Structure formats: C-alpha cells, structure tokens
Image (cartoon, rainbow, N blue to C red):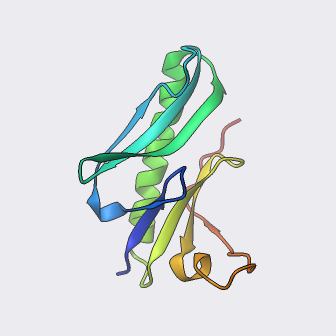
Amino acid sequence: MGDVWIRTISHSLVRADRVTEIASSRGSVHEERGYSIKAVAEGKAYILIDNSELEGTASARFAHAGRMQAALLLAVDAASTAAAPTVISYENDGERWVISAAAEIAGPAGQAAPVVEANAVEIS
C-alpha cells in the first residue's frame, strides 16, 4: 500500500493517514453564499476547498459540503489500495475529487499528468 496525500488549495500536500478531522464551514463573508472544507492533521488546519460561489440556503450549502466530504473519504479509501503513492486533488471545474499517481504529478516539467476520476460528485 502506497502513501495517500491530499492537495490543499495552496497546493501543499497533507498525508491522509495523519488527518484526524474533516470539517465544513461557511466559506464566504456573505451568509447566503459559499462553503469551505478543511482537514486537520497534527493540530493544524488545511483548507481543501474554499467555494464562495455556491449560492443557496445554508442547509443546502452544508448538504453539498457534506457530499463533498463523503466523496473525499471514498477517494481516500480507493487511493489507499494503490501500490504506489497517490495524490487526491479537488477539481473545481467539475466539483469532484481526482486521484493521480504521485510520480505522474512529480514527472518531468511540461509533461501533463493524467488524472483518474474517483467518486465524482455531479451537481446539477
């Protein structure tokens, strides 16, 4: 089993096995918009998603954030079975988590790293 890493919005990496909490909160200064998702590892919070564009009621936004959290847990579970180290990243355009081999991300400069969708959450 390889290491599983989660990419933050600042493009740093957090080891998934060190995450002790995944939580969501209002991600915007405006109460009617947005949500954020953070992971806590070794006592430090790391922002994974900061979506200030999502509109709707607070309960609808938090329900969406809950689905994104569940999808992240499923992606971590799926990635943990890989033999090589993997990185889980949030794809804002598709509102989904993607799993990539760490070697592909760290490959030669200028080479595009293919991504494999895992547990995509479709929002209509």
Left or right: where 39 falls relative to 86: left
For the N terminus, the image quarter is: bottom left
For the C terminus, the image quarter is: top right
**How many labels were placed on the picture?**
0
Which quadrant of the figure has residue 11?
Answer: bottom right
Left or right: where 16 falls relative to 9: left
Instruction: Indicate the position of residue 100 as horizontal and vertical percent values.
Output: 57, 72
Residue drawn 55% across the image and 19% down it = 29
Residue drawn 52% across the image and 30% down it = 35
Reply above or below: 46 against 5.
Answer: above
Instruction: Indicate the position of residue 7 as horizontal and vertical percent values.
Output: 50, 59
Which quadrant of the figure has residue 112?
Answer: bottom right
Reply above or below: 10 against 37.
Answer: below
Left or right: where 50 falls relative to 70: right
Q: In the image shown, does 69 or 21 lie closer to the viewer?
A: 21
Which quadrant of the figure has residue 15?
Answer: bottom left
Residue drawn 62% across the image and 18% down it = 56
Reply above or below: 15 against 94.
Answer: below
Reply above or below: 54 against 74.
Answer: above
Instruction: Indicate the position of residue 18 as horizontal and vertical percent values.
Output: 27, 60
Residue drawn 69% across the image and 74% down it = 114
Instruction: Indicate the position of residue 23 as horizontal and vertical percent values.
Output: 37, 38
